[in-house]
Image (tube, helix red, strand yellow):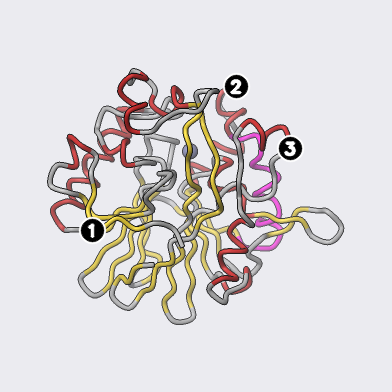
Amino acid sequence: MIDIGRIRVHLMNDGFFAMDGGTMFSVVPKRLWSRQVPADAENRIPMSLHCPLAVDGKEAVLVDTGIGERLSERERAIYKVDRRGGLIARLREIGLDAEDVTHVVLTHLHFDHAGGVVARDDSGAWRAAFPRARHFVQRVELDAAEHPADERAAAAYRHVPECIEPLRRAGLLEVLDGPTVLSPHLRVIVTGGHTPSHQCPILADGGETFVHLGDIAPTRAHMKPAWNQSFDLDPTETMAAKKCLLEHAARERWWVSFDHDHQVACGRLAASWERSGEIDDSRRWR
Ligand SMILES: [Zn+2]
């Protein structure tokens, strides 16, 4: 947990999973990336499902929702999913329920970020997991997910109808057109790169700033400009967004929050961040 002015940010986590290290580091040779994050016997690296929750008075803003309950047993084995009760259990540990979440900001609609927007009701049907929350997604991202341009996009977004329809039916889906100020202390910027309209939320109060990097730099190792995922639709756009955001964060001592780092939820950039991927003041999930 950290305080950004009078906003309390709980470093929530929907659990852990694992992805192929080659996929996560694309053109970087294994000899280099495996020194930063060791792979298991199937070449998978451990990853978190970090979903920070910013509480400000009666407002509780959740960033991304993790994998949730959607995956089949086979998929859970492939991705080594270990949710430890998931986000709802973490919320209960701080005395909150799913009904207390007022806003959900979705960086993008991949399964490990948007899967937790739905939960099963008593009849086994999917319903909104956070039934009172306004859910914010970029229009270009939603269009790309609902009308995939090719087979690769169709595979990446195959779960989306099941996740989005319950939100739409409940009137909880709010579509954004570009960078938007959501409240006096919260705005989103559009980075693109990873997906057509990937967005990053930025919280600011009392002279402190917190940015969630989403899949622009999902782990500390990905802070290096050329270390990108093979999932990125446009790696040059990812690199440009990453450099711009991280240079800003370094200069102004922002907190940077990592979606998938298996050890560190957030921290501030060390002087040598660009070369070493090091951070100061590192914090883990709750
Ligand atoms: Zn992603």
Q: For this view, does 275 lie left or right of residue 199? A: left
The residue closer to the viewer here, 270 or 152, is 270
Identify the mark at residue 152; answer none if there is no mark.
Answer: none
**In contact (CB < 8 Å): disc 2 and disc 3:** no
Tell me which segment is drawn in magenta: 157-172
Identify the mark at residue 73; answer none if there is no mark.
Answer: 3
Q: CA distance from mark 1 to mark 3?
A: 39 Å
Residue 150 coordinates in the image, percent (x, y): 57, 23
Q: Callout 1, which amino acid?
A: Trp
Disc on the earlier residue, 2 or 3 = 3
Write down the quadrant of residue 96 in the picture. Answer: bottom right
For the residues carrying marks 2 and 3, which lies nearer the camera in this image? 3
Location of the N terminus by quadrant is bottom left
Picture residue at 49% right of the left edge, 62% below the top: 62
Write down the quadrant of residue 2 in the picture. Answer: bottom left
Q: CA distance from mark 2 to mark 1?
A: 38 Å
Q: Callout 2, which amino acid?
A: Glu
Identify the mark at residue 151; answer none if there is no mark.
Answer: 2
For the residues carrying marks 1 and 3, which lies nearer the camera in this image? 3
Q: Main secondary structure of the magenta part?
A: helix
Q: Above or below — where is 250 with respect to 22?
A: below
